[in-house]
Structure formats: C-alpha cells, structure tokens
Image (cartoon, grey):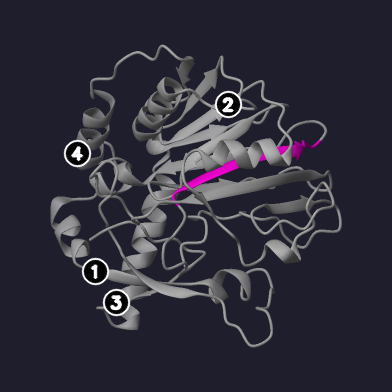
Amino acid sequence: MSFYQDFFDKQAIAAWNQRERQAFVSFELKPLAPTLGAEIRGLDLSLPLTEAQQTELRRAMGEYLVLAFRDQHLDSAQHKAFARQFGTLHRHVLAKSRVVAGGTDDPEILAWRTGKDSRFTAGDAWHHDVSCDAAPIWGSFLRVTRLPEGGGGDTLFANMVLAYESLSEPFRRFIDGLSAVHDGAQAWTAGYGSRPEPGQTFPAHEHPVAPRHPVTGQRFLYVNEAFTSHIVQLSRGESQAVLQQLYRHIERQVSFQVRVRWEPGTLLFWDNWATQHHAVWDYFPRERWGERVSVCLPHGPQV
C-alpha cells in the first residue's frame, strides 16, 4: 500500500472511474483527466442552445464537473446569455470595485486585470467561489480576455466528491453532521484588503461541511481555506485541526485534480459546489485579464 495514497483513496477513485457513461451526440467531448474535467468542441456558444444540447451539457457537467469549451469568441453579452441558460445570474458584492475589460460597470460580471502592479490575483488559493453567500453560486463561467505572453495562468480544479469519498468511513461519519461558517470578510478584507460599502457588511453564513448535491445526490466536501472560518459544533482548536486536515487532503491528492490550460477562445464552466479551483499566478509580471459570470439555482447544497 502506498504511503501517500491509502486503500480508501484507491477504492473511491476506482468507483468514480468505473461509472457507466453514455456517448454524447450534440458535441465532441474529450476527458481531460480520469477523475475530473472534459474538453468540448463542436458548439457555438454565441447561439442559444437547443434542448438536446442543454440536456447533454447538464449531463456532462454532472459527470465531469469542469467543462472547457474551445474555439469560442464571445463578448460580455453573449457570455451572460450562455450562462443564463443554466440559472439566475449572480451579482457579486465586489463587482463594482473591479474594472470590467470593456469599460462597463456590470454587477453580473466579476472582472479582473492582473499585471506587474498587482498585489494579488483573484483566486490564487484553493476555494469555492463566494461560499459565504446564503445561497452559494452553483455554476461559474470564466473566459480570459488577455492571456499572458509566453504561457502560464492555468487553472487547477479538485473534485470535492472524491475528496469526500476518499476519506475513511469513520471520518466521513464524523463530519456528516457538522456545519461551518463561511465569512466574506475573511476572504475579501483579510485576503484582498477590500471593504464593504458604507453601512454594510460582507455576508457570512453557515453551511454543512459535507452536504448533498441537490442535482446528483452525492456528498461532497464544502469547506475552503479562503472563506471558512470555523466548524460550529467544535471548539476553535478542534475546528482548526479538522479544517487543516481537510485542506491538506484536498491540496495533496493530485489524483483527483486536473490542470486546465488556457487557449484563445476558451470558456470554462464548472460546478462550484462539487469542485474547488486555484488560479496559478506564475506569469508575473505579465498580464492576465478575465471576466467571470456565475449562476444560482433555487436549491443550494443540502444536509
């Protein structure tokens, strides 16, 4: 038995990889890794999806959790129109403080420009997007509008279903009944130095540590170092120990991670509940610009 990967990890990965999957007829799909991610070609996302295309894309999302669409050249309006077919557009509390690449002020688009004068880049840590919201966003749709010369700026993803299923059975039973607070101030004030609008506070809400996905019914880990402050049912010392164990588990298990390389015309769509992601800032001092649109579903992660 490997020192770095125990029996439970192998069994969980084997079960995931042996699931029966049907072929897709509306587009070409190529897996990016056995446990996570797929590349899709043969669709024009600037046009409304047919019912068959939308049905197959929802199935692909449930099976692969991260979809990389290639050969797409969308403007902001087309980007939003594509996302809107999967849920209600999310309005990010920091959207107004970011400069949108087109010069517009749109609360439904979170934009950034990272360059030689940046103190940080958005997403440079393992995280779920905006997990501090009362109803956390389900799907995120990202396009990079300016790629760094010479490459770099990849995005890493980790499968949180496998992160949960690869834990030992006693540990899974222990965390199934726990909940944790996710605090926007921890991520945005302590992390980015951002401040809420006068008279307001950043959101903070309690969510299950291992909720069930309302679409797939699978349990997944829902704690992340960017937003999660503590586990409610434990002492602060116990909470810190459990959270650090889970964070290191997510980081070191490369067997359920995938690295997505950006190309011109790429749009990424991922399940923000069942995955975490990490933007790699390896291109400094070169520039990388992008825009993200996200959607909410009527029902969030459940106990």
Q: Earlier in the sequence, mark 2 or mark 3?
A: 2
Residue range in magenta is: 138-148
In this orientation, does residue 153 appear? no
Q: Residue at x 42, y 68 (%)?
A: 134
Judged by depth in the image, the label closer to the viewer, 3 or 4, is: 3
Q: CA distance from mark 2 to mark 3?
A: 42 Å
Estimate how packed mark 2 is, as few (under 14), some (14 to 19) or many (20 or more) residues with alpha carbons within 10 Å.
many
Q: CA distance from mark 1 to mark 3?
A: 12 Å
Q: CA distance from mark 2 to mark 4?
A: 35 Å
Residue 265 position, x and y percent, is 70, 26
Q: Residue at label 1?
A: 178
Estimate how packed mark 4 is, as few (under 14), some (14 to 19) or many (20 or more) residues with alpha carbons within 10 Å.
few
Quarter of image, res 42: top right
For the residues bearing labels 4 and 1, Cβ distance under 8 angstroms = no
Image quarter of the C terminus: bottom left
Q: Residue at label 4?
A: 7
Q: Which mark is residue 69?
A: 2
Quarter of image, res 221: bottom left
Q: Which mark is residue 238?
A: 3
Image quarter of the N terminus: top left
Residue type of the residue flagged with mark 2: Phe
Q: Is residue 146 magenta?
A: yes
Q: CA distance from mark 3 to mark 4?
A: 26 Å
- Near-viewer residue (143 or 157): 143
